[in-house]
Image (cartoon, rainbow, N blue to C red):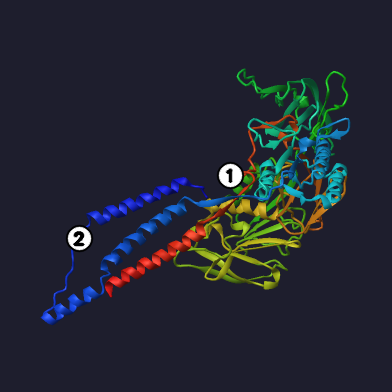
């Protein structure tokens, strides 16, 4: 028998404490004196017949000592070591399937070399009568096959062979080696003698010597555009580019082609602007370049991390369709023959603003609305080319040709059918609106607050109804068939309604801002911002994503379809927001269905390799060990159950002896 936690025996000190308590406690004796001689004789004869009080006290002390000793013994975890049935020929092969494993030499990737080595390991293991498990270390590692014995070796070998011909077997993303080692641990718990082999191209500063790491690398090198983005500065874009080379020192020719730059307003056609720069890349060091307008460039000798290339005014860009970045061999001008081809190009999209037309109509123009529309125009200037048209008194408002209609007091005769409609303080209701007005209602108390009916609605994000007061509003009822949602109310009458269907996008505010504090509250610009985000959402938040990154998709219309770089349809979404993860790099096109019978422009996004995977000679500090604390090849038979059973028995005996004292 052995003790797994010997320090638990310190609990035996409790026995010493028990003995000290018995020594120092007062020894009062309780005697019973009878009132008659007969009772005295009776008590005397009884004590002679039952002389067990001293024996009971001794048994009590003995039980208490044994109880404390049992508790200390349990803390020490006694167990009997037994030799487990281990198989010294069991192996677990972990294959890294990250993007860097796609680095190739002579048409053979590191991943294929790793699989070939696992095939040889499998054959040699089966020659010894062993057992083989294979783990694929992807972003979410999984077992290719688990604990395969000799009788199923052909099935495992076929699965391994299939990996060498399956283009998607090795991912374009990152791998989770720690989680892969966690899968190994589940097998090692059953057989601590199992040997783990990790096939990866990464090196580790502190790798567990118990994990064998055969090499899968040759003399590969890789040049890459790690990242690039455009930033608007003083009306013109500055283009930032990160370039690096791993495994070699090399001069690269960086070419930046800006397509449809600065299109003319009348024709919408721009020109092609090209920048070229020679970049000297040292092995493993990232070089950042910035193509910037010379008019705003101010040299800074302390900033050595970025190489600035000033541009003449005729080279500056304020609008573009796409930017294509590529790298070549600076000496020969040829395309690179490095180990990974997918990171030699990069695309930037989102350089052309979508035109958004807004019409504001009011019989009593409100500076709150006029100002907030100008603020929104400025805030959305990088995304939308917003045109705000304010209809003057005496002019006829339009009911078509705009993306957002704001009617205050003055209502259209019929609802526009090609954009979002926001009706404020309606004096009448347009045809086909589904709203029936009941007249004005004024409160004696001007501080009546609004009641939130749907606080989790997107239009109510960061809007607090109880902070908004109203002294006069228009009572109305609506037809349930028109799908309105009541967001805020007063006395059970709606004051803020909205509906967002493919055929109709409408919001109604049933009071004048002059009879409310909403116009001076922070909730007002938030509400207007929410309205544009809810009714006119962007399909994506940005135009460049990493492999494996979850992309949130929105749509104004009924559906949104994703097309691959080859133009093939991948998936169509009909419920929003939708989430999607891209697994291959390249340019993807997002197309919406018609919006109010208008065809919306498609949007392009670029999915890039993770920058850290472009480094094909990366190393990390360490990975989690898959080994348990138990000694290899040894199992233990624990005695805790038996000691616990004895402890319960001793507690019962001690209780019974205590009860005898009171009888």
Q: What residue do we see at 50% from left, 60% from top?
A: 642
Residue 629 image label: 1
SS at badge 1 = loop
Report the disc number at residue 27: 2
Q: Earlier in the sequence, mark 2 or mark 1?
A: 2
The residue lying toward the viewer, choosing from 1 and 179, is 1
What secondary structure is found at the residue carrying circle 2?
Answer: loop
Q: Position of residue 348 (x, y in %)?
A: 77, 36
Instruction: Please state if 31 lies on the left or on the right of 418 as rendered.
Output: left
Q: Which residue corresponds to the image point at 87% horizontal and 19% vertical from the top-left?
A: 332
Q: Is residue 282 above or below residue 43?
A: above
Q: Is residue 50 visible?
A: yes
Separation of marks 2 and 1 at Cα, in angstroms: 51 Å
Between tags 2 and 1, which lies in front? 2
Few, some or many C-alpha atoms within 10 Å of disc 1 (few <14, some 14-19, many ≥20)?
few
Quarter of the image for residue 60 reads bottom left
């Amino acid at each position: 028998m052995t003790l797994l936690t010997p320090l638990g025996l310190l609990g035996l000190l409790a026995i010493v404490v028990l003995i000290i308590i018995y020594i120092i406690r007062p020894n009062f004796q309780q005697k019973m004196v009878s009132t008659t001689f007969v009772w005295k004789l009776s008590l005397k004869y009884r004590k002679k017949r039952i002389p067990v009080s001293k024996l009971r006290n001794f048994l009590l002390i003995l039980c208490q000592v044994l109880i404390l000793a049992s508790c200390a013994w349990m803390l020490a975890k006694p167990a009997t070591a037994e030799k487990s049935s281990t198989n010294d020929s069991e192996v677990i092969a972990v294959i890294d399937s990250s993007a860097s494993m796609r680095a190739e030499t002579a048409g053979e990737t590191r991943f294929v070399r790793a699989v070939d080595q696992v095939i040889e390991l499998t054959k040699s293991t089966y020659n010894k009568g062993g057992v083989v498990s294979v783990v694929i270390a992807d972003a979410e590692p999984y077992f290719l096959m688990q604990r395969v014995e000799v009788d199923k070796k052909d099935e495992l070998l076929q699965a391994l062979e299939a990996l060498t011909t399956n283009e998607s077997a090795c991912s374009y993303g990152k791998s989770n080696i720690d989680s892969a080692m966690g899968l190994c641990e589940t097998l090692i718990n059953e057989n601590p003698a199992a040997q783990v082999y990790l096939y990866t191209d990464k090196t580790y500063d502190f790798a567990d010597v118990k994990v064998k790491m055969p090499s899968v690398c040759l003399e590969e090198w890789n040049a890459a555009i790690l990242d690039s983005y455009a930033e608007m500065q003083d009306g013109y874009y500055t283009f930032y580019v990160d370039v690096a080379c791993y495994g070699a020192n090399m001069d690269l020719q960086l070419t930046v082609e800006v397509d449809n730059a600065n299109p003319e307003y009348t024709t919408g056609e721009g020109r092609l602007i090209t920048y070229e720069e020679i970049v000297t890349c040292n092995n493993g060091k990232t070089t950042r370049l910035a193509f910037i307008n010379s008019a705003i460039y101010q040299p800074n000798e302390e900033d050595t991390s970025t190489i600035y290339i000033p541009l003449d005014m005729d080279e500056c860009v304020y609008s573009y369709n796409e930017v294509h970045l590529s790298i070549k061999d600076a000496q020969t001008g040829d395309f690179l023959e490095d180990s990974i081809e997918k990171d030699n190009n990069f695309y930037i999209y989102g350089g052309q603003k979508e035109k958004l037309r807004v019409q504001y109509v009011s019989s009593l123009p409100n500076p709150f609305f006029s100002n907030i529309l100008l603020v929104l125009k400025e805030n959305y200037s990088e995304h939308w080319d917003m045109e705000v048209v304010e209809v003057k008194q005496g002019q006829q408002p339009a009911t078509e040709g705009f993306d957002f209609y704001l009617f205050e007091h003055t209502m259209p005769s019929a609802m526009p059918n090609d954009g979002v409609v926001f009706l404020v303080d309606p004096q009448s209701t347009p045809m086909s609106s589904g709203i029936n007005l009941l007249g004005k209602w004024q409160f004696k108390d001007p501080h009546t607050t609004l009641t939130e009916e749907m606080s989790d609605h997107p239009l109510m994000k960061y809007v607090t109804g109880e902070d908004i007061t109203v002294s006069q509003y228009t009572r109305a009822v609506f037809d349930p068939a028109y799908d309105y949602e009541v967001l805020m109310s007063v006395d059970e009458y709606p004051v803020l309604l909205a509906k967002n269907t493919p055929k109709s996008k409408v919001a109604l505010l049933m009071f004048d801002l002059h009879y409310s504090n909403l116009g001076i509250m922070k909730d007002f610009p938030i509400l207007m911002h929410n309205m544009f985000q809810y009714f006119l959402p962007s399909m994506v938040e940005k135009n460049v994503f990493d492999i494996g990154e979850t992309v949130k998709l929105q749509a104004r219309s009924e559906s949104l379809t994703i097309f691959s770089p080859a133009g093939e349809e991948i998936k169509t979404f009909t419920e929003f927001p939708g989430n999607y993860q891209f697994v291959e790099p390249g340019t993807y096109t997002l197309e919406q269905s018609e919006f109010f019978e208008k065809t919306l422009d498609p949007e392009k996004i670029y999915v890039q390799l993770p920058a850290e995977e472009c480094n094909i000679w990366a190393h990390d500090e360490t990975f989690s060990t898959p080994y348990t604390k138990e000694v290899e090849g040894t199992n233990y038979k624990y005695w805790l159950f038996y000691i616990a059973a004895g402890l319960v028995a001793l507690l019962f005996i001690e209780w019974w002896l205590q009860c005898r004292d009171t009888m």
